[in-house]
Image (spheres, rainbow, N blue to C red):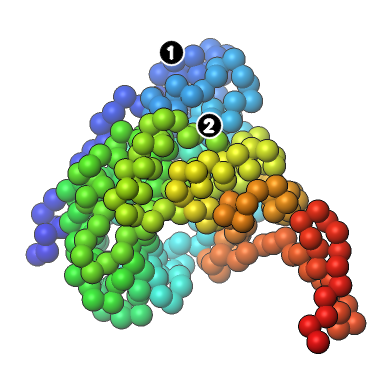
Amino acid sequence: MNTITRTMPRPVRDRSLRHPAELLESGLIPPERLAAVEAVAARYAIAVTPEMAELIDPADAADPIARQFVPDPAELETTPAEMADPIGDRIHEATEGLIHRYPDRVLLKFVHVCAVYCRFCFRRETVGPEAPHLTPEALEKALAYIGAHPEIWEVVVSGGDPLVASPRRIAMLVQELARIDHVKIIRLHTRVPMVAPDRVTGPLVDALTAPDVTTWVAVHANHPREFTAGAGAALARLADAGIPLVSQTVLLSGVNDDPETMAGLMRALVENRVKPYYLHHGDLAPGTGHFRTTIGDGQVLMRALRGRVSGLCQPTYVLDIPGGHGKAPIGPNHFSEADGCLTIEDYCGGRHTYRSG
Ligand code: SF4
């Protein structure tokens, strides 16, 4: 029995708002919306951390923080294109909780709970307190699979949010992975530094690293207002420990789909030593149509970003191709070709002919 099998995950204990009645008491929903929010809660998990609740302006019906975390009756409206498993995790499930989609890396769903439940979550059908944690037996099988596949260079630890697990449990996982010779990179995907920054304690930061393996942390952030003093301090604790940080952002209608907000977000990331990595086009998760932009809108936004902010602040705009086909960059293109001649577009929209010979 390896060391991980001896410890079960620790339940999350905090003062987060998890029930419609608590949202009502906190003034985050009006009384006339309670019944509709209860209907959403019967299907999808709710959690709003104190830090995020504090950021919300209840008087602003379009508050971008509320839009991300406070349930909306529109979540019960699904479109024909939406699907329970929009990025095809199940198709590539090698062992329970372990997704082997690309040759050199796997994704391990370490826990199925989160500090917050995002209303647009692409795994909303599988995350939540009702869903089981990965069992010790399943984790042992996943580690055995990784150990038996020397082509696996990187393990992406996700969920749910792996940083809601206890430092002791995270440390055991990191050490188990570090013992596998061919695993060189551990990448943890998390929203915790932004939404529950006090969880990023010294013991948790210590738990993330081990000899003979390099740990990266991918931080999920969607709006500049998420960069509270607490979030800045949590990111600094990670960066000061020498852990490289990259970001993930979901393009969300009514949250960050305008150039000013997106530029502010990307600059805030870089100022906090987080390199913008992916801007995800909204996945076809059930009941998330009110968040999705068109890809054309996303390309216009990316063009605006290219002209507006430093190259350090440019994420790659990607689509997870429905059906489990992986991520693809979706532009925009800055060149076209005709009659053997390239036309390159500059950041102001000016067009220039380019000949290589
Ligand atoms: S933190 Fe990630 S996994 Fe959890 S609800 Fe938000 S998007 Fe989904």
Kindly indicate the quadrant of the structure image that contains residue 33. Answer: top right
Q: Which amino acid does label 1 sit on?
A: Glu
**How many marks on residues?**
2
Taking the spot 52% from the left edge, 37% from the top edge, the residue there is 119
Residue labelled 2 has its Cβ within 8 Å of some atom of ligand 1:
no
The vertical placement of 357 against 316, above or below, is below
- Residue at x 36% of width, y 49% of height: 239
Dot placed on the residue nearer the N-terminal end, 1 or 2: 1
Distance from label 1 to label 2 (Cα)? 23 Å
In front of the other: label 1 or label 2?
2
What residue would you read off at disc 2? Answer: 225
Q: What residue type is labelled 2?
A: Arg
Q: Which of 165 and 345 is in front in this view?
A: 345
| Residue 150 pos. (x, y %) | 31, 81
Asked if marks 1 and 2 touch (Cβ < 8 Å), the reply is no
Q: Name the residue under label 1.
A: 25
Image quadrant holding the N terminus, namely bottom left
